[in-house]
Amino acid sequence: MFPSLYAILDAELAGERCFSIAENLASSGVEIIQYRNKAASSRLLYGECSRLIELLRGRSRFIVNDRADVAALCGADGVHVGQEDIAAEDARAMYGPERWVGVSTHNLTQFKSAIQTSADYIAVGPIFPTASKKNSDPVVGLDFVRRVRALASKPIVAIGGITLENAAEVFRAGADSIAVIRDLIGSPDPASRARQFLKLASEIRHSQN
């Protein structure tokens, strides 16, 4: 089963707490953590990712945002690409079949295209207004999650403005997983916040079975 909580560790938001937050999230039971540092040089990103891999090994699946080359070089568990990054199939060719490739989509055309790729999961959003990403795409809303749920068997990861307060309705709309950034990183206790998300997800899944 795809992890219900997809934590995104944004370097700009986390700052010097980045590695301690990663440790806290892993210790709380978060199974997948993506690292996003769009401002880093290739050398710096490689070093940071290598350190995070060692920190998370055997506890959380580690995903690199955007950079399939860095992900492959440092031996990450996966790479996540956006619409302006290398194509999912090119990332797969570089990265191999044994590791995950995820792709972001923001409209129906992009989602239908992603279904046809070898992507292991498809992210959709932003579901709600978000301040975590500069030049964010238009909000798609919960109805979009319901609509695409009927089109794909691949896991769907909802992203954008998701908090503990609105997460339940995102799961009920059909998302397999919720990607959370600010509501985890901005918490004074990310581990406790993550456990609250995981408990909620477990309750929702139990009620749907």
Image: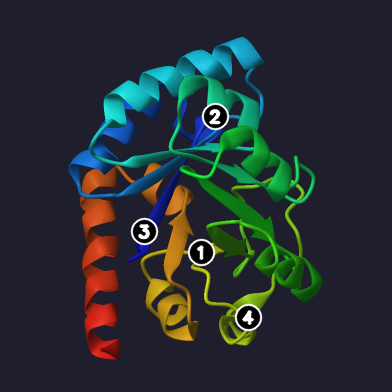
**Quarter containing the N terminus:** bottom left
- Gap in angstroms between the C-alphas marked 4 and 2: 28 Å
- Gap in angstroms between the C-alphas marked 3 and 2: 21 Å
Amino acid type, mark 1: Val
Q: Which residue does the numbered mark 2 point to in the structure image?
A: 71
Amino acid type, mark 3: Leu
Question: Which colour assignment does the render follow?
Answer: rainbow
Does label 3 or label 2 sit earlier along the sequence?
3
Amino acid type, mark 4: Val
Does label 4 or label 2 sit earlier along the sequence?
2
- Gap in angstroms between the C-alphas marked 4 and 3: 19 Å
Q: Which residue does the numbered mark 4 point to in the structure image?
A: 148
In the displayed structure, 192 sits above or below 23; it is: below
Residue 160 visible to an observer of this rendering? no
Does label 1 or label 3 sit earlier along the sequence?
3
Q: Which residue does the numbered mark 1 point to in the structure image?
A: 157
